[in-house]
Each structure stands twice: as C-alpha cells, then as structure tokens.
Image: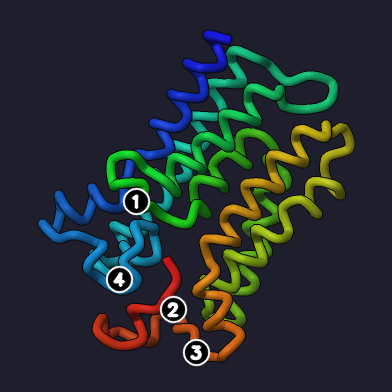
C-alpha cells in the first residue's frame, strides 16, 4: 500500500508540472492563459511564445508522462499480460495531474502530450501508430483538435490490434486516458460540428476566433 501511495503521488505531481505555463512565464514574462484558448498545452504555447517554446512544451509534457510510467515500471515490472497494474495506475495519475494540476488550481491542459508520454512507456507501438493518425489528420485538415481527438479515439483500438498480450487493466487504463482527453476537447467538438473550429496557423488574432482554438 505504501508503494502505491508513493508511486501514484509522485506520478500525479510529475504530471502536474505546468511546463507550458512556466516556459512562457520565464521566457516572455507572460501568462499563457491570457492568450488564445487560455490552455497550457503546446499548441497554445506556440501561439503565445512561438514554435520553439511550443516544441519544448510538447517534449517536456510527454517526458513527464513517460518518466512517471517508467519509474512505476521499475518498481513493478511488466508481466506476461503487459504492464503492471501499478504502472498503468501511475500513467493514469500522471495524465490526471496534467489535466488537473494542483499548482494551477486544478485547471490544466487536455492531456494529449502527457498521454503520449505514458503510451510510449507502456505501449510504444500503439503510441507510434497514434502519432501517425494525428499527423495524417492535421496534415490534411490543419485541425489540431480533430487530430488529437481521433488519435485518442484510436488508442484502445490500436491496443487491441497491436498488443497481443494485454490485460483488462491495460485496456481500461488506456481507454480512461483517451476518454479523459476527448472529454477535455468538448468545446472543440462542438465547434467542429458547427464548422467554426480554428485551423492551426491561419488565425493569428488572439481577440477573435483564436480564443476558441485547441491547445
């Protein structure tokens, strides 16, 4: 029980580090939440501070998810059915930390990059395939939100196809993370259905439709 408490608390705290917020604050002395969608994710950081800060945010957010799951895997190694229950739980805790960070009054990002990090640790082939889904959708539509949503939807399906030895706990954990990320995109889904969602790289006015863009 002590191991679980320490591992999950550590995973949550790692996940809750708001790298996007910190980078924009330190580099530009601005609050990323005052720009665009107000989100702390890589897309909105790119709007607020440029592509370099956006890339750093993406990498760091993914790294914290990877590290949280990887550390748990050292205490509870993989079994014949895949990642241990502790590692899966730590992955979930890290994503929850990003979405509901204690440092920002539980108002965080949408969890896509952090989810990617934990997927790389737990199911690397699934992570790679989901990146392909995301890249294809964004390249053809320039809708980051649609790419993120469809990549999240694809995760449980890809796990069924690409992970021959999988436990019910793994599928449940992957499905929960994917569902959480999709739910956090609820406003984007409404705009996608209405045809009013902003396309990445086109609308540069932070006081107009960019306020509605995905992050």
* Label 3 – label 1 distance at C-alpha: 29 Å
**Vertical placement of 213 versus 56: above or below?**
below
Residue located farthest toward the top when viewing the structure as drawn: 2
Residue located farthest toward the left when viewing the structure as drawn: 29
User: Do residues under tags 4 and 1 come within 8 Å of each other at their CB atoms?
Assistant: no
Q: Position of residue 193 (x, y in %)?
A: 61, 85
* Label 4 – label 2 distance at C-alpha: 9 Å
Q: Quadrant of the N terminus?
A: top right
Q: Position of residue 211 (x, y in %)?
A: 33, 78
Labelled disc at residue 200: 2
Count of marks overlaid on the render: 4
Single out the mark in the foreground, 4 or 1.
4
Q: Secondary structure at mark 3?
A: loop
Q: How many residues crowd around disc 4 within 10 Å: few (fewer than 14), some, or many (20 or more)?
A: many
Q: Position of residue 208 (x, y in %)?
A: 30, 88
Labelled disc at residue 47: 4
Between discs 4 and 2, the one toward the N terminus: 4
Q: Position of residue 205 (x, y in %)?
A: 26, 86
Q: Which residue is mark 3?
A: 196
**Vertical placement of 212 versus 84: above or below?**
below
User: Do residues under tags 2 and 1 come within 8 Å of each other at their CB atoms?
Assistant: no
Residue 123 vs residue 58: left or right? right
Between discs 3 and 1, the one toward the N terminus: 1
Q: How many residues crowd around disc 3 within 10 Å: few (fewer than 14), some, or many (20 or more)?
A: few
Single out the mark in the foreground, 3 or 2.
3
Single out the mark in the foreground, 4 or 3.
3
Q: Residue at x 58, y 64 (%)?
A: 148
Q: Which residue is mark 1?
A: 56
Q: Residue at x 63, y 42 (%)?
A: 119
Single out the mark in the foreground, 3 or 1.
3
């Amino acid at each position: 029980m002590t191991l679980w408490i320490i591992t999950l608390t550590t995973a949550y705290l790692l996940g809750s580090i708001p790298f996007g917020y910190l980078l924009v604050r330190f580099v530009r002395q601005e609050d990323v939440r005052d720009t665009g969608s107000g989100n702390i994710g890589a897309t909105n950081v790119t709007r607020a501070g440029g592509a370099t800060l956006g890339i750093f945010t993406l990498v760091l957010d993914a790294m914290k998810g990877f590290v949280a799951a990887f550390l748990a895997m050292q205490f509870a190694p993989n079994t014949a059915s895949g990642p241990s229950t502790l590692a899966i739980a730590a992955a979930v805790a890290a994503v929850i930390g990003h979405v509901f960070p204690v440092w920002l009054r539980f108002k965080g990002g949408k969890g896509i990059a952090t989810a990617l990090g934990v997927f790389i640790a737990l199911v690397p082939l699934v992570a790679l395939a989901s990146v392909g889904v995301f890249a294809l959708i964004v390249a053809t539509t320039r809708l980051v939100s649609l790419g993120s949503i469809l990549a999240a939807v694809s995760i449980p399906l890809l796990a069924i196809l690409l992970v021959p030895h999988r436990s019910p706990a793994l599928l449940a954990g992957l499905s929960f993370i994917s569902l959480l990320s999709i739910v956090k995109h609820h406003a984007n889904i409404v705009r996608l259905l209405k045809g009013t969602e902003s396309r990445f790289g086109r609308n540069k006015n932070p006081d107009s439709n960019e306020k509605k863009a995905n992050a």
